[in-house]
Structures are given as structure tokens and as C-alpha cells.
Image (cartoon, coloured by chain):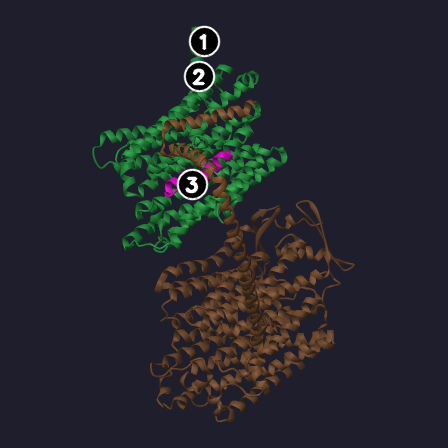
Amino acid sequence: MIDVLDILEPKNTHLLLWVLSLLGIPLISFLLSFFAGNQAPGIATLLIFINLLIATTMCFEFWSSETIIKGEWFATAGRQFTYAFYIDKLTLMMSMVVNFIGLMVHLFSVEYMRKDPCISRYFAYLGLFLFSMLLIVLSHDLLFLFVGWELVGLTSYLLIGFWWKKRKATTAANKAFIMNRVGDLGFLTGLMILFAQFQSFDLEVIKSLMIFSEIEQGQWVTSYLYAGVEIFKSVDGRWLSAAGIALFCGAVGKSAQFPLQVWLPDAMEGPTPVSALIHAATMVAAGVYMLARIFVLLDAQALEVVAIVGAVTAFMAAIAALSQFDIKKVLAYSTISQLGYMVMAMGVGAYTASLFHLFTHAFFKAGLFLTAGIIIHQLHHVESNKVSFDPQDMRVMGGLRKHMPYTFAAFLFCAMALVGLPGFTGFLSKDAILLNVAVWADLKGGGFYIPEVLAFMTVVFTSFYTFRMVFLVFFGENRLTRILGDGQITSQIKEGTRMLLIPACLLAILSISWALGLGFDAQDNWLVRALPTPIYLVPISYAAQSLVDVPDDVFKYLHPLVVSISVALALVGIIIAYFAFKPGAKMERRFTERREPVGALGQISFYHWYQDALYQKLFVQLIIWKSKGFDWIDRHMIDAFVVRFGQLQVIIAHIIKWLDRQVVDGLVHGLTLLVGSVGKIGRSMQTGNIQSQVMLSFLFLILLILIFAF
Amino acid sequence: MRLQSGKQLMETLNGIQENLVYLLPEMVLVLGIIFLIAFDLVFDRKKSVGLAAIAFFTLVFVVFWLVFSFPIQQQPVQLMNGLLQTSPQTAVLKLIFTVSGVVILFMASRSEVFKKLFFQSSEVPIAVLGLLLGVFLMTMSIHWLMVYIAIELVSISSYLLVGLSPGKKNAEAGMKYLLYGGAASAVMLFGMSWLYGLTGTLHFYSDTFLAGIQAADPLVMATAFILLLFGVLFKLGAFPMHTWAPDVYEVAPIPIVALFAVVPKVAALFLLWQISDIDRAITGAWEQWVSVLAIGGMILGNFGAIWQRNAKRMLAYSSIAHAAFLLSALLLGELAYQVLFFYVMVYALMTLAAFFLIQIFEQRLNALRFESFHGLGKPFPYLSILLLVVMLALIGLPPTAGFNAKFYLFAGLWNTYESSGQEVVLWVLISGVANTVVALFYYLKLPYLLFFKTTSVEVNKVMVNKVKRDCLFGTLIVIPLLLIFFRSDALVDLLNNVNFTF
């Protein structure tokens, strides 16, 4: 039998310095930036650059090994708590991506935030975010992961509300925070279930013990040694599924999945580079990363829930992105939709495809956000005392291709990756996901075809909204002229500076599949081979059927079909978008007058399935009613009781007053005399009369001897 | 015969010579005192820097020696023909004393007024070093006469320290302290003479002594011990020998008060712990005595503190209450040393921190009476938060080390009650918990005044800048309090590594 403490033995502590430097540098950046004032951008960027170098060195050092670093943290109530870090290909790649995109966003922000008076606070928060994100990535202990998890939540809150003078920003920050807490409640529950069963948060322990746990007559049975003492745990088997689903709830909050996804569109109130880093590339992907870490602990039921939630989210968000006016809102819904893809892939057991999409999405979505940031930044410059408009609204854009050619190119590359056109990274990863979903649906049959259908429909919508955005923003004539009736204003729109363009273009280049060394073929590349799908460790009767066991022939047979359908669907979406929004088309011409869509379908899309309104009615109203109820109870019951009680006391007081007059007064005179004399003794103590002090002490001394004597 | 006695003398002298290496800290202190006197006599003016340097250097040397000589102190060794005994505990205690001494001298140097008082002439540093020498000997002595001499050395230094600062009130307080202390030590000496008369020996670890007190009449024995106890309680500042504390604390300069609140108290407590071993074996009423003293001290200290309007007087009563808590740790028997040393370390830390912060308020901001604290939290938020943390530690609330100390103490008391079934211990526990609640009222009063009242005092920029550097040093003292809360097991491990067996 396994002894848990044997697994918790410290190991590889000599390698801790690597991890500490990777985590420590962003933390230093956080602390330094706060006090650096105007020097903050330079210092922070330099530190993150160093961190990227360290991450790269670690890639070369540890690529072919899987290393666990572990040591004692503290022990309490007979339980040993450890810190544990895990270095494998996945963590190395993740830390590379986080640091690289972090660096790009730092560079971009130097220019983007240059005029902000609180720039040092901004860079400090970015440092704190990178620290917490890397903590999530590196830790191999669910408790540490949870700490990082909460910290990224905090930084996200701080950065969404960075411009706290805007009321909308603070509301959005609160919303993001509260929605995430709802998800974290589930995460905590999952942690508690696992701790109750395995007595440790260490993932190595949990995994090793999970292999040996069994399902016997519906009971989830685990037995192991803890410090030599045999421990036998047996609970209802449904707790195993519950643990998986509860942990998934955390991912639902963080990765903006249905039904908690409403916070992410609002989070766009934060600075745009932050949206690129946190709300597109890294933090929101943390949920998917966490699912990957606990992938082997999920049973069939939990995985089904994951897959269905992912598919529903992908579809709903894609619909919502169709009719938005705000360019960042479109990107936000698109992010939710793509995260839905990743989660769905995890759910069907396509571990590799999901992570593959995570990496490719990180690059092209960050690229899209940064290019959108350039557009917003440049349009903002056109604004003046006389002219004021919302620079994020696509109704004031159009024809920007001529004014900003480089931005257009970068945006187009990233957009093609998002749509999934061959030759771009998004094509490879999305194709892998769709293929796996198709195989999974064939395996399961019945109602499980619905996720597949939703996934393929999402492809059409994705390409439609993406190219709607491309046509509306870059083609035709600038609509500002039409709105303001000022022909000169377009000449003021200029291309972004080099500091803005370089990060965006780098990310755009990395969206081409050859740039990452991935080639044209979707199935066999180094990234896929680096991240093989692990086998499930849950008891066999609860485990899902692994896609690893499906013969290769099935994949080979379905592959051409899936590729051709998905590319065809993407092209269909682009063509529809072209005819609807090409320059001079009817919808394009009327676009500036559009307010909100008419018709039920359009409204559902624009208001994102009325989910916000529903929550407002259901929960917010409920809480207000509850508060009103308590208020009523407070006023009418507790206060009334207090008043009655007070009246009673007055009555009693009157009785006592009578008694006092008649009976007690006689005694009082005697008492006054007594108290007076006691007071005198007390005062003599207070005034420091030395003789009486000594005397009192000695009196007590004699008393103490008397205690002994009797 | 002559030859033999000569040989014996040589052996004794050789023994003493071998022992000298263990007494190096004491000798360094004496040397430091001599240097201070010489320096004071030789130089005429501008000698404060030199005096401060000598005092600091002496203490820092002692700290280093104690740290690096720890391996040779792992085994208990009897010195000077059985007058003294070094052990790991004494080494740890000496370290606490010396570090406190350094902190206190540093504290003094942070204020113009006290800097002048401390380093203008050699008197105050000499008294401080003398006091440290006294407590060193006090912790090491295993001979009643040595105990008496050590306590007197501490007392005389203390009287001087109170009396040396100028002012009528100081002279008065010093005089009262002297008279009270004189009475206490007379009683103690009386007790010692009884013990000598009953046993015929002054070595309190020798078999003769144990046999002697076992043979004596219990009531007589108890009387002798109680007489003795009172001298030690005086140094501990514990009930019922506490009455000098508020008066002295109120008038004495803050660094000196901090010194009194930490160093002699801890030494007296250690002495009591040593005596308690013997006492428990003989009289059997030991638990009852300690319980009565502890409960009395807690109630008197806490309720006394509630009515104070002066920060220093309040801390005086608080230290009486803490002395009672420390006393109750003696009830724990086997467990005592761990809890005791943990509590002592945390107590020393938080007391020094509290007095340091109060000194900043008194010297920089002229605040000592409670009214003058009003609203200072707004211009000095960081300083006020530090004070809040220290006050939380003194109450015993998380996230500070004060919580761990109280928690270990209460847990220990409960275990003792469960294993021994003595009801007195339960009463001490109940009184301790109840008094912790009472402590909330007065400790939190200062932060309350700082943050929730408004001030009419104008704060200028110079003041804010001066306080900034003080805040830095304040943080250095406060951070350990927080660290120990999170890693209390580290300190416990450290204490466990010290070989605590005689």
C-alpha cells in the first residue's frame, strides 16, 4: 500500500531556484513598478524580457524531462502540506506563451498608456498578474493552484476597474469578481471532496491514489497509509463525479463558460492591452489549463457535462458576436466562443487538441486585440474638443485599410487564423477539435450529435462575424465623414507608431502555421506530439471511453470529411459577410443609422440571449427582495421588541423607584460610608503611598501562607 | 597538610580558569563598563559618539559570541565551584537579553531627548550594561547567595536608571522604587536565611538541599519559600508586588521602561521556573499559589489598564497582566519550557515593538495622553497600522504571533487540566480567556482614537518625513510578529533543537 508521506518526501529542491526566479521576477516587477513612477514601463518591460529569457533557457534545459519539485511547507493537525511544482512540456510551453505575450503587451502598453497618470500602478498590476498566472502554470498542488487562481482573479478585477473613475468600469470589475467567486465556490467544493478522500492537495498524491481507488457496489473506495497508519475511505460513488464537476465550476467562472460567461464582455471596460493579455490569451485560458491538469481525474459523467457546457457556450457566444457594434465586444464574444471550443474538446477527451487550440488562440486573439487597440488608440487621437465619439464603435470606422495598411495586414492574418483558413494556426487546432468531436459523437451516438452540430454551426458564425468586422472596419469609405459631415476629418487618421505595430505584427506572423513550424497538415506536428493525451486514472467502471483507444482508421476516415466541411462552412460564412457588408451593400450603407436590431433573433443575438436581464430579474431582484424582507423584520419585529422591552424597563424602574424611596434609602447611607472608606484605601494605593503599598503586598503574602496552612 | 591545601587551591584556581571561557560574555560586559568609565574620564566633550560606539560594540560582540559558541553550551556545565551553571537555556535567554539591549540602545538613539540622556555621559549605558550583567548572572546562578547578589545588581541598576533621568517626579518614583525594592529584597533574604538554616547549604540543586527541605516541617518550608518568592515576584512585576510598576513606567524614559518590561521580567521568570521544580516536589501547594497569583495578576492588570488615560501607564498594567500569563505557563509541568520560551520570545518582541511605536508618538508627535492621539491615523496611516498590528499581538489575535503564544498557552493549560484534573488550572484557563476579552477594550482604544477621531493639530511636512524613517525601523520589529504567526512551527522547531534537559 502507498504511504502518502512517501510521495510527499522533498525532492529536487535544488531546482527550486529556477521556479523561484521565474515567479520572483514578475513579483519584483510588481513591487518595483509601484515606486518607480515614470520609470515603471522601462523597468517592468526589461524584467519581463529577462523572465522570457529564463523561460526559454528552461525550455532547453528541461524539455525532455518531467521534473517534480517538492518540499515541506508546514504541518498541522498531523497533516503534511507541501509545495510542489511540476516542469513538463506543457508547463514549459505555457510559461513561454505567458511570458511572450506578456512581453508583447508590455511593449504595446508603453506607447498605449504613455499619457496615463497612473502608469506605474498599471505596470505593477501587470507584474502581479504574470506572477499569479505563472503560479497557476507551475504549481502541482491544488492549494497553490487555487492561490494563484484567486490572485489572477484579483488582478483581473484591479485591471478591469483600472479607470475607476468610469462608473461602468467599476461595475464591470465587480461583476467579473462576483461571477468568478460563484465559480470558485465550486472549485473549493471540489478541493474539499478530494482532500476528504485523499488527505492531500498534492496532485501527485491524488493521482497515485486515484489509480488504486475502486468502485465497489456504488461506493468509491480508497485505502492507503498515512504516516504508517492505514486509512480507509468509502463514500458514495457519485462524489467522484461531483468532485470533477465541482472543479469544472471553477473553470466555468474563470474561462467564461455558460452560465457564468456574462462577465467577460463587460470586462472590456479595462485597457485594451489588458484585454489582450488577461481576457483573451492567458487568464481566461487558465480554466482550460486547470482542466488539463485534472483531466485524468474526471470521470465519464463529469466529462459529458464539460463537453455539453463547452458546446453550448461556443454556440451562444458565436450568435451573440454576430450583431455587436463595439469592436471589443465582438472580440470578447469570439473569445468566449473559442474557449467553449477548448472546453468542449476537453470534455470529449481531446486533451491534445484542446491545448493546441489554447496555444494558437493565445497568439491570434492577442494579435486581434492589439490591432483593435491600435485602431482605438488612433481614433482616440482624432477626437478633440469639438468632435467626440466612441472610438470602439464600428459605426465610426470603415475604410481604415488606406489609413493603416500594416494594422490591416496584421488584423487580416489574425482574423484568418480565427476563422480557420488553411495555412493559419487556427485551422490546424480547430480542425483537430472538430475531428475529435466527430469521432466522439460517433462513439456515443444519440443526443451526443448535438454538440457536434453546434460546433460545426459555430464555424459558419465565426467566419461571418469575423469578416463582418473586417469589412466594416477596413473597407469602403470612413463613416465618420458621413456622420459628422466633415470631409477633412479622415485625413487626421494615421497609422500607429512602431511601438504599437511591432508587437501586433509579431503576433500576426505567429498566427501563420509555418511560423510555429507546424506545417500544413493538421494531424501530425511537433506540438501535437509533445502533448500526448493521458489515460484516465479514475476507476474503470466510471471512466469515459478514451479517444486514445479508438483505432487510427476511424480518424483517417473522418479527417478529409471534417476538413472539407469546416473549410466549406468557413468560406460560406465569409461569402455571406461579403455580400451583406461589402462596400456599398445595403446593410453597409444603413449601418451608421443602426441602433439595435429588430426582430426576435436579432435581439437575442444583440442582448446575448437576455442572460444579463435574466440574472438581473432572478438574482439581483431576489437579493433586493430578501434585503427588503429583512429590513421589514428588523423594523417591525426587532425594533418593536426593543421598544416594548424599553417600556417594560421604564415600568420596572418606576416600581424600583418606589422601593428605593421607601426601603433602600436607609441602607444607602450606611453603604456610602463603607464605599467611602474603601475608596480611601484605593486612593491611597493610587497616590502611591509607599508604606501602604508595601503593607498591602505583605498582607497578601500572609494570606498565601494561610492558604497553605489550611 | 599545607601542601595539600595549596594543591587544592591550585586545582580550584585551575578550575576557575577553565571556566572563564564560558563566562566570556560577562567579562566582556565588565570590560565594556570599564571602557565606558575610562572613556568618560579621559575625554571632556563630544564623547556621546564614543560612548554609544563602546556600548553597541560590547553588546554586538556578546551577541556574536553567544551565537557562535552555541555548540559548546549544549551541555550544562557548573562553573565557579557550583555558583553558576550554563545550559542551552541560559544561552538562549542571554541572547534575548542582549538583543533587547541592542534594540533599546537603538531606540534611545532615535530620539533627540533620549540620545542626550543616554550617551551624554557614561552613567546610563553603565547602568544598562550592569543590568544586563545582573540578569546574566541571575539566569545562571544555582546558589542562593549568587541569586541574591544578581538580583541586587539588577535592582541597583534599575534604581539608578529611574533616578538618573532629570525631574522631580523621576526622583520621587526612583525613591519609591528603591524603598519598595528594599523591602522586597529584605523579605527575600529573610526567606533565604530560613532555607539555609533548614538545609545547611545554599546550592539549590544539591542533594543535601533536597534532603534538607524534605526533612523540614512543611509549613515552615512553605513560609520560607513564599518569603523567597516575593523578592522574585518584585522583579517580575507580578501581582501582588506590582504596585511600583505604573508609577515607574509613567515617569521613566521609554527605552528604559522597555528594558524593565522585558529583561528583568524574563530573568525572574526563568528563576521561578527553576525553583518551581524543587518546589513542586516538596510543598505540593505550588499549583495553588501560582494559580492565585496568576488569576489575581490577570484581573488586576487588565481591569487596571481599562481606566488609564496615558499610554505608558496602560502598557504598565498590560505588562502586569502579561506577567500573570507568563506565570500561568509555569503550571504546565513537562510542556512548560516550550510554551514558556515561545511566549517569552513573542512577549519580548511585541513589548519592544509597542514601546518603540509609543516612543515615536511621544517624541515626534507629542502624543502620550490619549487625547493627543486623536485622528493621527489620517496623516500617519502606516505608523498607525503598525501600532494596530502590535496591539492585536498584545491582545492575542491573529494574524500575529501573539495569537500563537496565547493559543499554545491555553491549549497547554487545558491539557494539564485534563491530565491532572486540578480544578485550579481550569480556573486559570477561564480567567485567562475572559481577560483576553477584557484586553480588547483597552488595547484597541489607541487604534480607535487614531482612526475614528478627528484632530485639530496641524501636521507639517517635516514631521511626516521624520516619521518615515522611524516607520522603516518599526516595520523591521513588527514583521517578525507577522512572520512567526505564519511559520510558528519554525520557531518551535528552533526551540526544540535547543537541548532542554538538565
| Callout 1 touching callout 3 (CB < 8 Å) | no
Residues in magenta, as a range: B294-317
Between residue A81 and residue A98, name the one nearer to us: A81
Q: Mark 1 vs mark 3: same chain?
A: yes
Residue position for label 3: B305
Is B492 included in the stretch rendered in magenta?
A: no
Kindly identify the residue that appears in the image at 57 percent across and 38 percent down: B412
| Observer able to see residue A533 | yes
Mark 1 chain: B
Residue position for label 1: B4
Residue B215 higher or lower than B289, as above or below: above
Amino acid tagged 3: Ala
| Callout 2 touching callout 1 (CB < 8 Å) | no
Q: Quick check: A502 left or right of B42?
A: right
- Crowding near the residue tagged with mark 3, few <14, some 14–19, many ≥20 C-alpha atoms within 10 Å: many
Calculate the distance from the C-alpha at mark 2 to the C-alpha at mark 3. 53 Å
Q: Chain B's shade in the image?
A: green
Which chain is assigned brown?
A: A
Q: Which of marks 2 and 3 is nearer the N terminus?
A: 2
Q: In which quarter of the image is residue B250?
A: top left
Residue position for label 2: B12
Between residue A368 and residue B161, name the one nearer to us: B161
Mark 2 chain: B
Q: Is the magenta stretch mostly helix, strand or loop?
A: helix
Is B316 included in the stretch rendered in magenta?
A: yes
Mark 3 chain: B
- Please provide percent x and percent y for residue A221: 73, 55
Q: Which of marks 1 and 3 is nearer the N terminus?
A: 1
Secondary structure type for disc 1: helix
Amino acid tagged 2: Thr
Residue A492 higher or lower than B263, as above or below: below
